[in-house]
Amino acid sequence: MRHVGIPLLCTVGLLSFAGSTRAGEVSLPVTEVALIESPGASDFRILLKFAGIGDLDANRVDVANLVMPDFEFSGTLPLDAYPINTAWSEGAVSWGETWSSIGGEGEHRCGRILLSDSDGVVRAMRVTRYARAAASGGSAANGLLLRRSSYSEEAGAEGIPGLVAQLRSARIVVLLAE
């Protein structure tokens, strides 16, 4: 009998699971994705907006995960997630925006994940705090901003456009309390 190993990826706020929804779960797809690169492409921000996040009952949000599809990624990339505080649209954001007012900086981090080389692994970042805030009708319903973690020593945005294309099929899966 041949045993097949299942890759397991672990880091702060990271889960690996099949990604299918069950009764009591809601799957909220990405509706908009924007990549904003700094001059010279030395840094980047990825903005994600989700369908129906503001329609949830915040009191019923038990657990929420940003589920990212299996995709090819070379190397490692630690990402932090932050709620976006200002309305935005895919074609109307640029690096020159004031990020302290739009969200994505400071102590409001709501998730962290380490992306690395791995095949067949569905990646998920715990974003329960974000989902509860967005469901409460606050400005967090404007989406999530992903940026390189502050503890990362790597620079540049190589390979990020491909990652952004793959994130179009990401979703937030919310487990609702009874």
Image: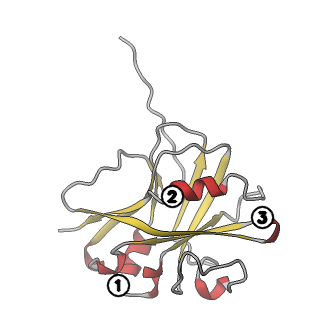
Using the numbered discs, state the Cα–Cα distance from disc 2 to disc 1 in whole angstroms: 25 Å
Q: Which three-letter amino acid code belongs to the residue tagged 2?
A: Leu
Q: Which three-letter amino acid code belongs to the residue tagged 3?
A: Ala
Using the numbered discs, state the Cα–Cα distance from disc 2 to disc 3 in whole angstroms: 19 Å
Residue 62 falls left or right of residue 156: left
**Label located before the other in sequence (1 or 3):** 3
**Label located before the other in sequence (2 or 1):** 1
* Direction front: furthest residue: 91
**Label located before the other in sequence (2 or 3):** 3
Please tell me which residue lies in front, 38 or 150. 38
Q: Is the image coloured rainbow, by chain, by secondary structure, or in one colour?
A: secondary structure
Q: Which residue is mark 3?
A: 41
Q: Residue at x 46, y 50 (%)?
A: 69
Q: Which residue is mark 2?
A: 167
Residues at marks 2 and 1 touching, judged by CB atoms closer than 8 Å: no
Q: Secondary structure at mark 2?
A: helix
- In the rendered image, residue 71, in percent from the top left (x then y), is placed at 53, 45
Using the numbered discs, state the Cα–Cα distance from disc 1 to disc 3 in whole angstroms: 35 Å
Q: Which residue is mark 1?
A: 136
Please tell me which residue lies in front, 91 or 158. 91
- In the rendered image, residue 56, in percent from the top left (x then y), is placed at 29, 77
Marks 2, 1: nearer the viewer? 2
